Image: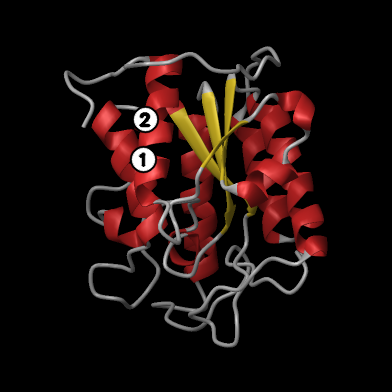
Amino acid sequence: MCSTSAQFSIPKRRNTSAVLDAFVHNLAAARIGATFNQYCEGGAADRDPATAAAVRRANLRAYLRAHAQAPVVAVAEAAGWRGARYSGIPLLSERLIDDAAGPYRRTSTAPGGFAEASASIVQEVLRAGGWVDAVLLWNVVPTHPAGSTPHSNRALRSAEVVAGQEFLLLLLDLVRPRHLVAIGRTAAAALPPGLGAVEVRHPAHGGATQCRTALKSLLCAWLGPRVAEVA
């Protein structure tokens, strides 16, 4: 059953590719605490460290252009090393990118691309309901908080959350969605209360089923199922 919930009420406005491209350019130039900025840096398992960051910028530009009119924005915590670190797109693993079909390209040396569990769960919900184009995914901190090794994730630092919030709020001002979802406590705490974000459980650490159920329920209520049956 679909249920009703709060609505993100800032009115819609048209976006231009130039504005979104400038947003990506500024993100690539940013230093967000001690995080790894995959939009200007290369290394680790990058197929070509010299060009990988440019590919990820192109991926993000294409993603934002395609979702600039999305009625829903869903915000998670940070870029994970198995996800946006190599894809350049929030909550999208390289495993879900088809190099030959486009519009996105992989940047890692991993056969078939890396796969991130949290990204796979969220994408599974979007694809099952036909909501991929209607939901723009983002992270409070869009860059990768690497731990002791490049292929690890660590907890965010408060200063990094504050720095990431600037990009988050700017993106929301550019997109002006009707509905806003916070995936996890970190995202919920980073969003101003007045925006009316609805929190769902983060899929990590045993939260997969709760995340799937809650996210599906919200999107069903806001958008309706766009396929014959929502899995």
Q: Is residue 103 visible?
A: no
Using the image as rendered, state which of residue 150 and residue 204 is in the foreground: 204
Q: Quadrant of residue 183?
A: top right
Amino acid type, mark 1: Arg
Q: Is residue 52 visible?
A: yes
Q: Residue at x 46, y 16 (%)?
A: 222
Residue on which the image places disc 1: 212
Colour basis: secondary structure
Amino acid type, mark 2: Lys
**Quadrant of the frame with the C terminus:** top left
**Quadrant of the frame with the N terminus:** top left
Assign a secondary structure to mark 1: helix
Assign a secondary structure to mark 2: helix
Using the image as rendered, state which of residue 56 and residue 121 is in the foreground: 121
Percent x, y of residue 13: 66, 15
Q: Which residue is drawn at 18% across and 22% down?
A: 229
Q: Which residue is drawn at 36% across and 35% down?
A: 213
Please rate how many residues cluster around mark 2, counting C-alpha atoms within 10 Å: few if below 14, some from 14 to 19, many from 20.
many
Percent x, y of residue 145: 63, 70
Q: In this view, does 134 lie to the left or right of 152?
A: left
Q: Which residue is drawn at 64% across and 29% down?
A: 197
For the residues marked 2 and 1, what is the alpha-carbon distance in whole angstroms?
A: 6 Å
* C-beta proximity under 8 Å, tags 2 and 1: yes
Percent x, y of residue 221: 42, 16
Q: How many labels, in total?
A: 2
Please rate how many residues cluster around mark 1, counting C-alpha atoms within 10 Å: few if below 14, some from 14 to 19, many from 20.
many
Q: In which quarter of the image is residue 111?
A: bottom left
Residue on which the image places disc 2: 216
